[in-house]
Amino acid sequence: MTDNPEKNAGARGADFLQFIGGFAFQTLVHLGKAPNPVTGATGVDLPNAKYSIDLLGILQEKTKGNLTPEEDEQLAAMLRDLRMEFVNSSKAAKTAPNGPEPEPEEKTES
């Protein structure tokens, strides 16, 4: 690694789309649409899904005018799709016979 932050970022391969993609994946996990990468379990956690979507919304608001056209389009598409998934999951949770599925308990190591 060099002392040049731009070269360091490129060496790691990190960019804005990967950053927001991480939030999108986290949201899908909370919506039960993807398995938790640590436990492999799926479960619905609507409050945390909403929080992740809200964070992406804040990023969209605070980066307005500073993104490339591709980044702007991808962020808008992610938010649109995640919001629709949230609405669908919320409706499904309300109509489920036993209410929403509980989030699996996480095991902590001592």
Image: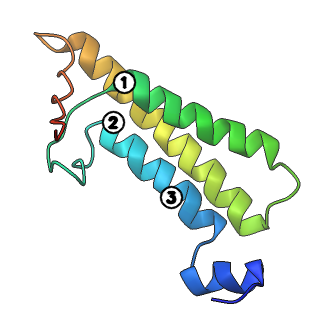
**Residue 96 against residue 87 in the figure, above or below:** above
Say which of 91 and 56 sits in front. Answer: 56
Any mark on residue 21, and which? 3
Say which of 30 and 96 sits in front. Answer: 30
Say which of 31 and 6 sits in front. Answer: 6
| Disc 2, SS | helix
Residue 91 location (% of width, % of height): 33, 18
**Residue 82 against residue 6 in the figure, above or below:** above
- Quarter of the rendering occupied by the N terminus: bottom right
Q: Which residue is mark 2?
A: 30
Any mark on residue 58, and which? none
Give me the C-alpha separation between circle 2 and circle 3.
14 Å
* Amino acid at the residue labelled 3: Gly
Which residue is at 65% across, 64% downward? 16
Q: Quadrant of residue 106?
A: top left
User: How many numbered badges does the structure rendering display?
Assistant: 3
Give me the C-alpha separation between circle 3 and circle 1.
19 Å
Any mark on residue 46, and which? 1
Mark positioned earlier in the residue sequence (3 or 1):
3
Residue 10 location (% of width, % of height): 64, 84
User: For this view, does 56 lie left or right of residue 49?
Assistant: right
* Amino acid at the residue labelled 1: Leu
* Amino acid at the residue labelled 2: His
Residue 48 location (% of width, % of height): 42, 28
Its colouring scheme is rainbow
| Mark 1 neighbour density, 10 Å: few (under 14) some (14–19) many (20 or more) | many
**Residue 21 against residue 86 in the figure, above or below:** below
